[in-house]
Amino acid sequence: MPQQSTLIGKVLLVWALVTLGLVGAYDYLPAKTWQWIPTDNPEWYLYSEDIFGGASYAERASPSDIHLRCKLQTPRIDLEPFCGLHIILDGRADPPLVDLSDYDLMRVDVDYQGANKKLRFFIREFEPGFSSMQEPVDSSKYMSMYVSVDETTDTIEINLSEFTVADWWVNNNNVPRKHAQGSIERVAAFGIDIAFPAALGYHELRIRRVVFEGDWVSEEHWYRYILISWAVVILLAGAVRLYQLRRVATHLKAQKEQYQQLSEVDQLTGVMNRHGLSAYFEVVKADPTAWPVSVLFIDIDHFKPINDNYGHGVGDVILRRVSETLAHCCRERDQIARWGGEEFLMALPGTDLEAATRVAERARVQVAQLVHPELEREQATVSIGVATASLPGELEMTLDRADASLYRAKRQGRNRVIRFE
Ligand SMILES: Nc1nc2c(ncn2[C@@H]2O[C@H](COP(=O)(O)OP(=O)(O)OP(=O)(O)O)[C@@H](O)[C@H]2O)c(=O)[nH]1
C-alpha cells in the first residue's frame, strides 16, 4: 500500500515538472502558417466608381498576376473617386468562406505606384442572418484598416485584430448592432482599395504575396488543456487513493473478524470459549423464540490422573476427542463451549428440562463409549449437571443450578446425569 502511495506522489511530481515544461514551451511552439498568395488561378475582381457612373476606370495590368491599373478622374457624379480589387479567399470552397480565427497575423507584399498616401486593406466577412449566400462578397461585412504606402517597400505586417467594421458599411446598409461586430470566422474575400482620400491620376497595385500566421494552439487553449490535465490527474489520483483506502478498510474488517473469532474460540478444542459464550448468551437473550433454554455443565471425571499418568499431551488429545463427541450430540442450533480446564458447557435453546436430560444422557453414553488408544485401562467419562431457564432473567441462576447439579453428580459417583428439579 505505501508503495502505491509513493507511486501517486511520483506521478504528481512528474506531472508538475511536465507542467512547468509545458508552460515554458508555449513560446517555442512552431507557428501555423498559410501561404495564400501566390495561389493557382486566383479568383479576383477589380472595380472603380465607374460602376456607379463615375469617370474613373480600372483594368487588369497583367494576365496572370493580381495586378490592377486604374485612373481616378475628376468626379462626374456626387461620389469620391475610388478603385480597388478583392480576391476570393477560396473560390473552390462551398460556401466560399474561410475561417481565419486560428490566425492572428497577416504578412502582405504589395507593389504600389501612384500618388496616394494610404491604401485601404479590407476583409469581407460573411455575417449570418444578414449577408446573403447569393452574393457572399457584396453582402458581407466590410472590415478595413489603412496602411501607409511607405510601408509597401517592405513586407507589411498586419495584426488581424486591426481590421474594424467600417462605419460607412454599417450606416449605408443600416446594419443592426448585433451584426456590426468584427469577426474573421467566415471570411469571403480580402482586398485593397485606393480610396478616400484618393489622389487623381494613375495608380498601379500588385499583390505579390499574402501569408497568414497563427498558433496551432491558442494560449488560452494551451493553459486550459494543462488545467484539464491536472483535473484528470488529480481525479485519477483521488480514485486510486479511494480504491486503496477501501482495500485497507476491507482488509482491516477481515482482520477484525479474524481476531474476533480468535478471541471467541478455544484454541485447543476449536469450540467456543467462555468469552464467546457470553456473546452467544446475549444473542439468545434477545431471541424470544429461544426459550426455554437448558444448560448442561459437563466435566470429565478423574482427568487429573490421566494428565499425571500419560502427560499433558495425551490429556489434550482426550480433551479434544471429548469435545468433538459432545459437539456431535447436539443440534446445529445448540452451542458447546469450553468453560475452562476439563469442563464444558452446552446451551440448548428451545429445549425443556426433559429433552435436555435426554441429550445429556446421550452425551454421557457416547463419551463413555469412546475408545482411547493412548490410555491403558482408564476410561474417560463425564458427569453432567442439567438445569433449565424459562426466561432470560433466569439464566444466571440456571448456570449456578446446573453447576450445583454437576457437583451432585460428582458426589454421587460420577459418570452420571443429575438434573436440577
Ligand atoms: N491436558 C490438559 N489438562 C488440563 C487442561 N486444563 C485443565 N487440565 C487439567 O485437568 C485436571 C483437572 O483436575 P481436577 O480439577 O482435580 O479434576 P479431576 O481430576 O477431573 O477430578 P473430578 O473432576 O473431581 O472428577 C487438572 O490436572 C488440570 O491440569 C488442558 O488444557 N489440558
Image (cartoon, helix red, strand yellow):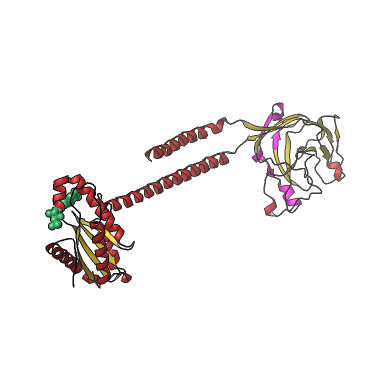
Residue at 22% over, 64% down = 296
Q: Is there any visible trace of residue 281 in the rendered image?
A: no
Residue occupying the far left of the picture: 411
Q: Is residue 248 above or below residue 292?
A: above
Q: Is there any visible trace of residue 367 in the rendered image?
A: yes
In this rendering, would 375 be left or right of 178?
Answer: left
Q: Which residues are magenta?
A: 146-175
Which quarter of the figure is the C terminus placed in?
A: bottom left
How far across and down, in percent of the image, does residue 61 sit? 85, 30
Q: Is residue 362 above or below residue 228?
A: below
Residue 151, quarter of the rendered image: top right
How far across and down, in percent of the image, does residue 212 sit? 68, 34
- How many marks the image carries: the answer is 0
Residue 380, quarter of the rendered image: bottom left
Q: Is residue 160 magenta?
A: yes
Residue at 29% over, 53% down = 260
Q: Is residue 39 above or below residue 402?
A: above
> 93 or 139, which is in the foreground?
93
How far across and down, in percent of the image, does residue 256 sit? 32, 51
Q: Is residue 85 above or below residue 260?
A: above
In this rendering, would 229 be left or right of 56?
Answer: left
How far across and down, in percent of the image, does residue 162 sit? 65, 39
Residue occupying the far top of the picture: 153
> 149 or 292, which is in the foreground?
292
Q: Is residue 220 magenta?
A: no
> 285 or 195, which is in the foreground?
285
Which quarter of the figure is the N terminus placed in?
A: top left
